[in-house]
Image (tube, rainbow, N blue to C red):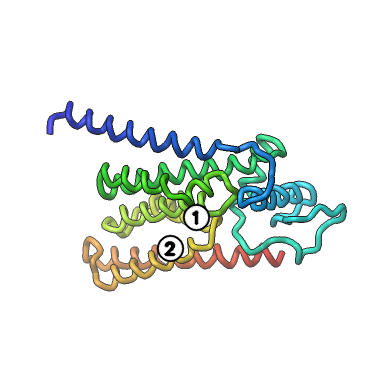
Amino acid sequence: MCPDRVGGRRALVYAAFAVLLAFQIFLGLWGVADQWTRGHNGWNGAAYHSGARNTLRWGELFPLQYDTANVPPKKERLYTHAPLGLHLHNLASIRIFGDRELSIRLVAAFWSVAALCMLFAVVRRLWSDAHGLLAAAVYVALPINAIYTNMANHSAGFIFWSLLTLYLYVRSRDAAPWRWPPFILFLGAFTMAATWDWPAYTIALCIAVHWTAAVGRDQLPGRRQQKRTVALLQLVVFCGWVLLLFVGHLGLVEC
């Protein structure tokens, strides 16, 4: 295929994705500064807004939702059942944009747009331009996307970081054992996914099972024992890191 045709096709792909991205941004900004009222985008956002306010007020790490008392909270009232990624981003947004509804909804909107971009990039790199556009179009068209785009939720950031984690694993599995810098980048991406939502640990289990099977079938490039040993060491490090993150959350709860 001639370079001009390739360039023209790529320009069409980017133009089509730009349209989808514009729709996603529109959904993210639609009512972004509205007051908290009834409905999913009222109660849920208000809870996380209250949690961020109380952390700034009382210095507690975990959010304290639905509480407006003028005395420090008891430990058992803190909401410790979710990772802290969303809460910490809400705190940072309030520090930057002020104590208002816009700050909470912007966090969700940003990561919803970022998740769409990551979905397009990953599917496009692993399959084709057409697959990437189709995946992005389906994602934008889903009713649940319109509901959650700027609603305070754990899923948007999780989708972004989990897709990056899986992409790094899939792209690097045929090069195992990894060089250590890409391996550390992979651990970092998973760490961010785990700080956003619990399903990250399900993804970690799937990766560990696949990784173990690959080593067991001796499908790693190069049959030297040294390479196999390094691959196993990296698998053990990954599993240990996943366990450390989970235990670390429990440790924060007990502190």
Residue in the image at 49% along x and 62% along y: 199
The crowd level at tag 1 (other Cα within 10 Å; few <14, some 14-19, many 20+) is many
Is residue 241 visible to the viewer in this orientation of the structure?
no
Answer left or right for 120 relative to 30.
Answer: left
Q: Amino acid at mark 1?
A: Ala
What mark, if any, has residue 70 been given in the picture?
none
Q: Secondary structure at mark 1?
A: helix
Asked where in the image residue 12 lies, by quadrant, the reply is top left
Residue 242: where, in percent of width, then height?
A: 49, 64
Residue in the image at 41% along x and 46% along y: 141
- The residue at which mark 1 appears reads as 193
The crowd level at tag 2 (other Cα within 10 Å; few <14, some 14-19, many 20+) is some
Q: Is residue 47 above or below residue 120?
A: below
Is residue 116 visible to the viewer in this orientation of the structure?
yes
Asked where in the image residue 74 lies, by quadrant, the reply is bottom right
Q: Secondary structure at mark 2?
A: helix
Answer left or right for 180 relative to 155.
Answer: left
Which of 72/190 is in front? Answer: 72
Which of 111/133 is in front? Answer: 133
Residue at the limit of the structure toward the right, as seen here: 70
Residue at the limit of the structure toward the bottom, as seen here: 216
Q: Do callouts 1 and 2 mark residues in contact (Cβ within 8 Å)?
A: yes
Answer left or right for 146 relative to 82.
Answer: left
Residue 254: where, in percent of width, then height?
A: 70, 67
- The residue at which mark 2 appears reads as 203
Q: Amino acid at mark 2?
A: Ile
How many dots with numbers?
2
Quadrant assignment for the C terminus: bottom right
- Quote the CA–CA distance across marks 1 and 2: 10 Å
